[in-house]
Image: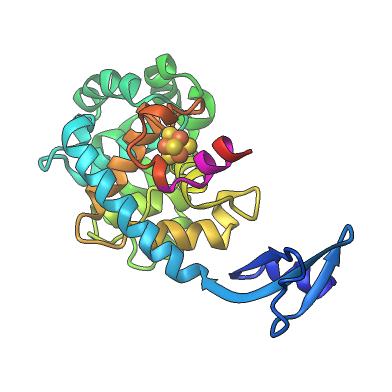
Amino acid sequence: MADFFNAFKSEESHFLSPGKGGQLNPDYPIITINNIPFTITVIKYSMKTIHEEKIYFFRNKLLGWYKEEGRSFPWRKNTASNYELIMAEIFLQRTKAETVANFLPRFFKKYPNWDELGKASEDEIKAFIKPLGLYKQKGKRIYELAQELRKRKGRFPKKRNEIEEIPMMGQYITNAYELYVLNKKSPLLDVNMARVLERFFGKRKKADIRYDPYLQNLAYNVVNINKSKELNWAVLDFAAKVCKIKPLCNLCIIKNLCTYYSKAIYT
Ligand code: SF4
């Protein structure tokens, strides 16, 4: 029995069919739960197949939605420099995009590139970013990042593990660097993207997004298309406008295949 229930946790879905009036299929194993006999139907749907169909649907719908409803921010313009893109992503962590959009023009006027930012002291940076909040911790790390990049003349190392070792360049910002600067199909997987993916496709297995292989794998799969950047932005905008902490499921264009929605209406 333990093996049977463990199978539910595996990569495949199994289905229980209750026996009606002695019509259990004798070809399949029979078990009893609370005196009700069930056949373990041998139909198995590979998780991979289900995800592929759902991923295709998810991408198409969200890219269509993004064309009409996507937000427009300065760092999404083709003219944004690598410096601007990375700094925008740093400020976007734990701060609303609209607040960051208002603040960034002033920041870039004062510190237009890595070199100028590298000339600023830690206290100057902290004082300048104070209106955004979290300025002590963020200011210190931005200062360290700027020192490192100034030393490197604005160039990042080639290997991902070396990039991640630079102050402030955790998994998320390194993904942003890969997406924007190296044109790789990397996900901007933060709590907001994680919320949409988990609700639509199914829950993560570990508390920390960075170490959840299911969520990581899923996110990389979802954005693995030519329009990777647009899809990343589409998911983030969808998280901000529709699949919010309190989701607007009734207005949602992907509710038909959404795991969270189907559970909400059938339970
Ligand atoms: S149906 Fe609701 S939970 Fe599912 S993706 Fe849409 S808004 Fe999010």
Instruction: Verify whether residue 226 appears in magenta.
Output: no
Q: Provide the residue span drawn in magenta.
A: 257-264
Q: Where is residue 155 in the image (x, y as percent from the top left)?
A: 27, 56
Q: Where is residue 224 in the image (x, y as percent from the top left)?
A: 30, 62
Residue 251, placed above or below residue 159: above
Judged left or right of residue 172, residue 101 is left
Question: What is the quadrant of the N terminus in the image?
Answer: bottom right
Nearest the viewer among 193 and 43 is 43
The residue at the far left in this view is 79
Q: Which residue shows up at 39% across the image and 21% down it?
A: 129
Q: Position of residue 71 (x, y in %)?
A: 23, 29
Q: Give the main secondary structure of the magenta stretch.
A: helix
Instruction: Tell me the quarter of the picture where residue 252 sits.
Output: top left
Instruction: Tell me the quarter of the picture where residue 186 sits.
Output: bottom left
Nearest the viewer among 93 and 38 is 38
Q: Which residue shows up at 47% across the image and 28% down it?
A: 247
| Ligand 1 - quadrant of the structure image | top left
Does any portion of residue 160 appear in the rendered image? Answer: yes
